[in-house]
């Protein structure tokens, strides 16, 4: 999953309107925010294996600390607890917790059986990535639905709230199609995957915080 995780974040604004979109996006993206650091530190492993699935050339060899079901619930609890301590917004904390755990659920649907239930435990996965049309249909429908819910919950206060949001959506779609359907697989995990992922995190979350601050909740 890629924009499927973003879909969850956008849709969450309807459930927790007082929570900034950057936080709502960070929740379903949290496991992928942690994962690049864990790979760099040598705690988890991924390798390039063209044909591993139809949709991605990556073989996720070992990632129990970022992507097991048990750890996702622990990360969710930590993130939600920190958020609640800072905001005292109980509903937002619940939505944040669910958002983090949603990452494991969506990856379980997408991945082949490489999603651990707990470190060292059984690995599961339904293998949606074995079908490119199926993956595109599911993610794009999710993304469209998430955007509809976000627009139902908010409206722009000014040009930033309108056009920075539109540009963000366009960039996500361009990145999705160019990364998944264009060019040969990357040749370097760190240079072609990990570093760009870290850069994307550093750009996309502040950008979401920025344009969401320039949007306001719709009445009712």
Image: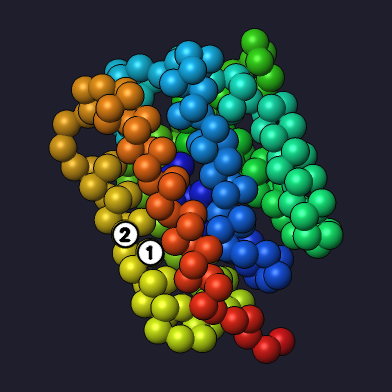
Most foreground residue, 102 or 161 = 161
Locate the C terminus and report the quarter of the image it occupies.
bottom right
Q: CA distance from mark 2 to mark 1?
A: 5 Å
Question: Residue 121, labelled with which disc?
Answer: none
Image: 4 above or below 111: below
Q: Residue furthest top?
A: 120
Residue 74 image-quadrant placement: top right
Image spot of residue 199 (x, y percent): 37, 42
At a point 52% along the width and 38% down the height, the residue shown is: 33
Does residue 100 appear to the left or right of 201 in the view shown?
Answer: right
Image: 95 above or below 162: above
Most foreground residue, 198 or 180 = 198
Q: Which element type, helix, strand or loop, lies under badge 2? A: helix
At a point 61% along the width and 77% down the height, the residue shown is: 153
Q: Which element type, helix, strand or loop, lies under badge 1? A: helix
Most foreground residue, 142 or 64 = 64
Does residue 204 appear to the left or right of 119 in the view shown?
Answer: left
Image: 116 above or below 85: above
How many residues crowd mark 2 within 10 Å: few (<14), some (14–19), many (20+)? few
Report if residue 124 is visible in the image.
no
Is disc 2 in contact with disc 1, using a CB cutoff of under 8 Å? Answer: yes
Residue of label 1: 168
Image spot of residue 24 (x, y percent): 61, 57
Question: Residue 171, labelled with which disc?
Answer: 2
Image spot of residue 211 (x, y percent): 48, 71
């Amino acid at each position: 999953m890629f924009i499927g995780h973003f879909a969850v974040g956008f849709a969450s604004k309807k459930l927790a309107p007082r929570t900034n979109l950057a936080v709502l996006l960070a929740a379903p993206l949290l496991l992928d925010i942690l994962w690049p650091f864990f790979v760099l530190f040598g705690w988890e492993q991924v390798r390039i294996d063209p044909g591993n699935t139809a949709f991605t050339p990556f073989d996720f060899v070992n990632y129990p600390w970022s992507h097991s079901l048990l750890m996702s619930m622990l990360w969710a609890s930590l993130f939600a607890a920190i958020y609640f301590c800072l905001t005292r917004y109980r509903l937002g904390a619940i939505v944040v917790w669910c958002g983090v755990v949603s990452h494991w659920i969506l990856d379980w649907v997408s991945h082949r059986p490489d999603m651990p239930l707990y470190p060292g435990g059984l690995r599961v996965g339904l293998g949606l990535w074995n079908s490119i049309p199926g993956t595109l249909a599911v993610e794009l429908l999710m993304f469209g639905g998430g955007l509809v819910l976000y627009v139902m919950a908010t409206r722009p206060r000014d040009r930033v709230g309108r056009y920075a949001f539109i540009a963000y959506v366009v960039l996500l779609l361009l990145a999705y199609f160019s990364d998944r359907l264009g060019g040969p697989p990357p040749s370097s995990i760190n240079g072609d995957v990990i570093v760009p992922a870290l850069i994307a995190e550093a750009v996309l979350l502040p950008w979401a915080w920025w344009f969401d601050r320039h949007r306001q909740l719709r009445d009712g």
